[in-house]
Amino acid sequence: MTIQAVLFDLDGTLLDRDTSLLRFVHDQYERIGALQLVQKDVFCERFIELDQHGYVWKDKVYEQLVAEFAIPDLDASFLLQDYISQFPQHCIAFPHLHETLGQLQQQGIKLGLISNGFGQFQYANLQALGIAHFFEAVLISEWEGLRKPDPAIFQRALSKLRVPPEQAIYVGDHPENDVRASRAVGMKAVWKRSDQFAAAAEADAVIADLAEVIGIALPAVQLRRQASRDLDFI
């Protein structure tokens, strides 16, 4: 059956969150003098450990850091606001992000995004990557009042795109929230390989690079026709 839409997760799928976060933490340490009472590598390593790949919100992370390192005259809420405002400046995309979205869109594939997290923060990261304009539907859990793996958030996205689940692909890195949840509503699930998780056994396909989505979403004949048109243009 022809694929009409491809929907994506954000963190760990389009956004290289681990690399982005490490860049941000180093920058925050350098900018805020009070943090420098702690050795840099100690502070950064502890931050990453407490963050748990984004599954612990930063209010808890900063409260723990300030208490654990007994940092004087520094409020956890100040550090949290700095994180919210400055993190988007450090967003790093996975390779071939723009090329992949651009080619899918050029071939008439509708694009959507479903992400857990805080609305404005996640959307700011989407904008920082320079890809917001590619998506016809962007659903972020805070704004929707729903979180993955709730099937309702996938169904809502498909409704916005006006595409039945059997004609849609969902790409994500989380075996439960992305792979199993999207398959449960009838979508084809593509697992983006992640060192954080064990293999998603239920995935319909596994990729290591975003560019591989093109070959999954587009029939080979369609790709050959596009290549032929490109050669004719040259």
Image: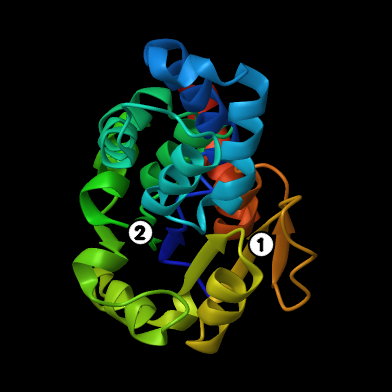
Q: Is residue 212 above or below residue 96?
A: below
Q: Is residue 20 visible?
A: yes
Kindly indicate the quadrant of the structure image that contains residue 197: bottom right
Q: Nearer the viewer, residue 59 or 145?
A: 59
Residue 126: percent from left, percent from top? 33, 41
Q: If the image is split into quadrants, where does the N terminus sit?
A: bottom right
Q: Secondary structure at mark 1?
A: strand
Residue at 61% in and 80% down:
180
As rendered, which of 175 and 209 lies closer to the eye? 175
Q: Position of residue 8 (x, y in %)?
A: 46, 57
Question: Which of labels 1 and 2 is toward the front?
Answer: 2
| Mark-to-mark CA distance, 1 and 2 | 20 Å
72 and 26: which one is in front? 72
Whether residue 214 appears in this view of the structure is: no
Judging by the rendered image, the residue that carries numbered circle 2 is: 117
What amino acid type should be assigned to the residue bearing mark 2? Gly
Q: Residues within 10 Å of mark 1 (few under 14, many from 20)?
A: many
x and y percent of residue 101 in the render? 44, 42
Label number found at residue 97: none
Q: Is residue 167 above or below residue 95?
A: below
- The foreground one among 95 and 91 is 91
Q: On the picture, is 59 further left or further right than 64?
A: left
Task: Locate residue 64 relative to residue 120 in the image: left or right.
Answer: right
- Cβ–Cβ below 8 Å for labels 1 and 2? no
Q: Residue at 50% of width from left, 36% of height from top? A: 97
Q: Position of residue 228 (x, y in %)?
A: 56, 34
Residue 191: give its label.
1
- As shown in the figure, which amino acid type bears the numbered disc 1? Trp
